[in-house]
Image (cartoon, rainbow, N blue to C red):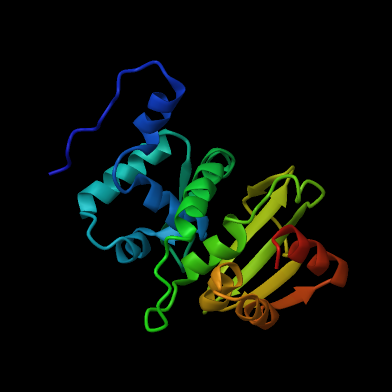
């Protein structure tokens, strides 16, 4: 049984925002969609513990709020996928970035518990994103992390949905992306950064590395 939806009944921007984003699992669903289009089954797999009817309800609510899009891919793929909408990229990404920044140094860095590709993407590209440092960038990027592909763009000083071919492709492990931020010594952080591979025009690669401190 899905619990009744909470409403704070306060005409305050924080309360109004929490009416949409404050329900359990909502921000984690949006977190998953930062990684690109996801099927319902993908979301179930990455959110262990969420009831199937609750996931369906949360997705419907986020669609109604205009934060995600649902689309049906044509045959032979013929599957339904969910993505962040343009409004989702504009409104939700700054929130997720702030929460991820707050939680990043609270990660348990255990060698026998490897980081997930999504955690690597958050640590490597979402947390360090700075609108002032990226104001001159306007390009799409592809990031390959432990076999999972992430795609995004930088436009008008913000993270956005990708359109067109990537200007730079980055290949890295999640462990190296996290270590590049949180390694216990400068030597460990530098070694992790050196293992990150960049493919693209040298000027575009340099701009990306400078913008994301890589």
Image point (40%, 25%), residue name: 16
Q: Is residue 73 visible?
A: no
Residue 152 screen position, x and y as percent: 63, 57
Q: Nearer the viewer, residue 152 or 80?
A: 152
Residue 183 screen position, x and y as percent: 56, 74
Which image quadrant is residue 31 in?
Answer: bottom left
Q: Nearer the viewer, residue 19 or 176?
A: 176
Image point (59%, 76%), residue name: 185
Image point (54%, 38%), residue name: 91
Q: Horizontally, is 205 left or right of 56 in the view? A: right
203 vs 13: above or below:
below
Q: Nearer the viewer, residue 209 or 161?
A: 209
Residue 175 screen position, x and y as percent: 52, 77
Which image quadrant is residue 65 in?
Answer: top left
Q: Nearer the viewer, residue 70 or 25?
A: 25
Residue at the extreme right: 203
Q: Horizontally, is 163 left or right of 45 in the view? A: right
Q: How many marks?
A: 0
């Amino acid at each position: 049984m899905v619990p009744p939806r909470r409403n704070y009944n306060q005409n305050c921007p924080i309360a109004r925002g929490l009416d949409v984003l404050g329900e359990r699992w909502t921000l984690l669903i949006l977190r998953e969609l930062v990684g690109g289009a996801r099927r319902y089954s993908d979301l179930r797999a990455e959110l262990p513990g969420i009831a199937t009817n609750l996931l369906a309800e949360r997705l419907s609510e986020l669609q109604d709020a205009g934060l995600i899009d649902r689309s049906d891919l044509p045959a032979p793929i013929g599957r339904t996928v969910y993505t962040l909408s343009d409004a989702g990229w504009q409104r939700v990404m700054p929130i997720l970035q702030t929460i991820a920044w707050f939680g990043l140094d609270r990660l348990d860095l255990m060698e026998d518990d490897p980081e997930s590709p999504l955690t690597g993407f958050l640590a490597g590209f979402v947390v360090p994103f700075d609108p002032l440092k990226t104001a001159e960038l306007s390009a799409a990027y592809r990031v390959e992390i432990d076999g999972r592909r992430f795609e995004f763009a930088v436009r008008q000083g913000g993270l956005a949905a990708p359109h067109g071919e990537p200007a730079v492709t980055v290949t890295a492990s999640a462990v190296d992306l996290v270590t590049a931020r949180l390694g216990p010594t400068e030597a460990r952080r530098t070694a992790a950064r050196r293992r990150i591979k960049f493919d693209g025009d040298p000027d575009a690669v340099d701009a990306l590395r400078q913008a994301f401190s890589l």
